[in-house]
Image (cartoon, helix red, strand yellow):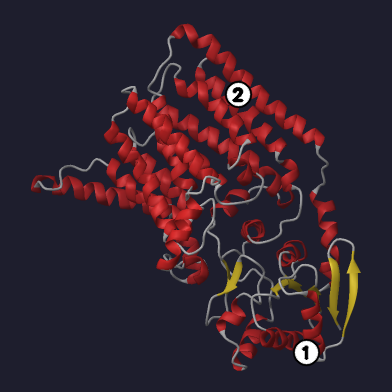
Amino acid sequence: MNKYSLYFILLFLGSFGVALKFSSSHEKIPIGCDEFGYLNLSKAFTDGKACADHTNRPYLHNLLDTLRKLKITENEISYMVTPHAYHVIPGTQKIINQYPPGTSLLLTPFPISYRQIIFPFVVTFLLILMTIIALKLNTSSGFSIFDLLFPVLIFIIMVSAPFTTELSRINSLAPTFGLLFAAGIILNHRPYVSLFLLALTINFRIANLIMLLPIALFLPVKNLFRSQNIKNNLFVVLKSIGIVVLAILPILIYNTFITGNPFASTYSSIDQKMAPWGNIAQNLSYYFGIEQRWLRFHCITLLIGIVLTATQKLHYTQLLKYTSFMLVNYLFFIFHEVKMDYYPYASSLLLFGIISGELIQIKFSEKYNTIIRTSFIGIAILTFAVGIVRYSKKPHINFEDSKKSYETLCHYDIVWGDLYTGSSEYICNNSGFRYGPTTSRARKAAMFFLRDNNYSQVILLNDNTVDSLTIVSEIKETGLSYHIQPDLHLGNLLIIE
């Protein structure tokens, strides 16, 4: 049995094992920002409405005109009339989803009821498949240290943070694991292919653009100070630009349709802000805290690189070049106002792929082949077995039964709240409004407009960033008739009559 047969065994046993283990994490209706955002955009792609107003708000234009005539500001409007992951483009009549299309497009071929549960399988399948392709591109033959360690990596990904965090929720990180890892493996041998794979991840995460900067160090650029090299270097630059544009065509086309500008950001201004100087020290402390899992993964990877350098398997200048990805990644987010623990993930996977590319070069003697094959198959079977055991020990619920917890919300046109406003839109096709991120005057104006236009409204008192007593007091001030009705799953519902 050759080594590629082993990898295909891992491809299926590993992917199914991971999917089974995380099944229970993906059986509930999506709530909040990310999960709802990606899944609802996928639903819009299915309906052919992703590049139009797919939020089912026929009243929107008149509502926005009414609010603006009352001098309600764009900040008060933008996030009030949408659930999480959506906002109104200031000064327009258009609601957009803030996320890039990558994750949503990846899930679109699958039936809506299976999109969540299939996610861990797709992510793991892509990771292993891209690794197989990278090994083929590296024309790797014979067994190496990498072949011994890779199935261990898949098992670790299944049982250890930070990977388990991303496998247990719909997100834009996990689908790029395979692309980043493979890009790292082939970087030294196939820099243009590596550039293409890296640029593909931008369709999932815009911030991965910054990873294009260090990759310039690996392109076949000749001495910049010699005039005879200008033609060659110009060709390298133009070819690289062409490769990047080709890779990011999906997001360029998508952005053009929804904003009119291929290079416009769909994220809100809050997500694009750079940190003030006073926050830099706080950001440094945050990202370099020992509790940061991606920092730990960076450190483990660097430690392997240092060992390779000490044993003369890797030159220190190469290791310094490799760390440029980590340096650029951390520098960017240290100066970014919004802090998230997963922001350094891209350089972590890319750097680990690069170091893995070095491990591929360290071959075992053929006398160890049987041991390696046995170990490889054993860990693949263990991964599958752990998935089965975990699946059998957890209660499970199908998509249709999960929807029943929210079916009360389907009786209303407008659902005011916080996290469940997206859940309501996803299963009921009604409209989620966020109660918290606006002002009292904006809410009251919107409620009166909706009431006068015969749209039924309910406020989720227990799913709200505003205290329930404050909400009740505010509704009393409006003079609107209402009653409160308890719900077993959703808590108290304030129904405007």
Residue ID for mark 2? 9
Q: Is residue 229 left or right of residue 301?
A: left
Mark-to-mark CA distance, 2 and 1: 62 Å
Crowding around mark 1 (Cα neighbors within 10 Å: few <14, some 14 to 19, many 20+) is few
How far across and how far down the image is residue 172, in percent? 56, 51
What numbered label is drawn on residue 55? none
How far across and how far down the image is residue 457, in percent? 80, 78
Q: Is residue 468 left or right of residue 316?
A: right
How far across and how far down the image is residue 284, in percent? 45, 55
Specify whether residue 181 is in view.
yes
Q: Is residue 382 left or right of residue 288?
A: right
How far across and how far down the image is residue 77, in percent? 61, 81
Residue type beneath disc 1: Asp
| Helix, strand or loop for disc 2 | helix
Residue ID for mark 1? 452
Residue at x 18% of width, y 45% of height: 232
